[in-house]
Amino acid sequence: MTAPVAMSTSARSVVRIDEFLEPADVAALADAGLTAYQAAAKAARTLRTGDRCVVIGAGGLGHIGIQVLKALTSAELVVVDRNSDAVKLAVSIGADHSVVADSDWSWLGEMSVLRACLIWRASCSR
């Protein structure tokens, strides 16, 4: 018989959750949420007022990234996704501009008008 293994961590790694939440329901935030947070926090260190930041993908990670970027920076946020419902939700949680990336590529004109640099998936040099 194998003895149970106990693991310990620091208080910095512990997050209090409301008593009405089940740990299994919010467990993904510890992984996916931190992934989006790390990317957004890295971008926020270089973004200034008047800058534009493009978030490519308005799914779960994109939505977390938008909220983090809004909290950490005053840059304008542009969200790009093929799913118009995801784009609408992104605007409702803080994106300043939205672009639905249709398969006809007409959305590229919108991007050039916005003169935005891509930093969610690539670095933007100032």
Image (spheres, helix red, strand yellow):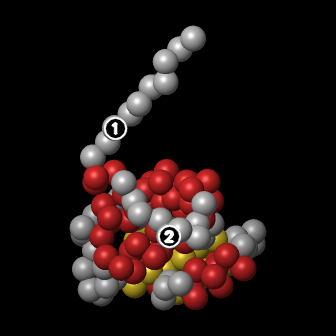
Helix, strand or loop at label 1? It is: loop
Upstream in sequence: badge 2 or badge 1: 1
The extreme right residue here reads 103
Residue in the picture at 54% in, 76% down: 79
In the picture provided, is 32 more to the left or to the right than 51?
right
Kindly report the distance in space between the C-alpha atoms of the residues bearing marks 2 and 1. 22 Å
Q: Name the residue under label 2.
A: 18
| Place of residue 85 in the rendered image (x, y in percent of width and height, measured from the top left) | 72, 79
Quadrant placement of the N terminus: top right
* Residue 123 visible in rendering: yes
In the picture provided, is 107 more to the left or to the right than 63?
right
In the picture provided, is 104 more to the left or to the right than 81?
right
Q: Which mark is residue 8?
A: 1
Q: Residue 102 carries which label?
A: none
| Place of residue 33 in the rendered image (x, y in percent of width and height, measured from the top left) | 48, 59
Q: How crowded is mark 2: few (under 14 residues within 10 Å), some or many (20 or more)?
A: few
| Place of residue 8 in the rendered image (x, y in percent of width and height, measured from the top left) | 34, 38
Residue in the picture at 24% in, 67% down: 45
Residue in the picture at 47% in, 74% down: 66
Residue in the picture at 53% in, 14% down: 2
* Residue 52 visible in rendering: no
Amino acid carrying mark 1 in the image: Ser
Quarter of the rendering containing residue 34: bottom left
102 above or below 2?
below
| Place of residue 97 in the rendered image (x, y in percent of width and height, measured from the top left) | 52, 87
Q: Which of 30 and 60 is in front in this view?
A: 30
The extreme top residue here reads 1
7 above or below 44?
above
Q: Nearer the viewer, residue 5 or 108?
A: 5
Amino acid carrying mark 2 in the image: Asp
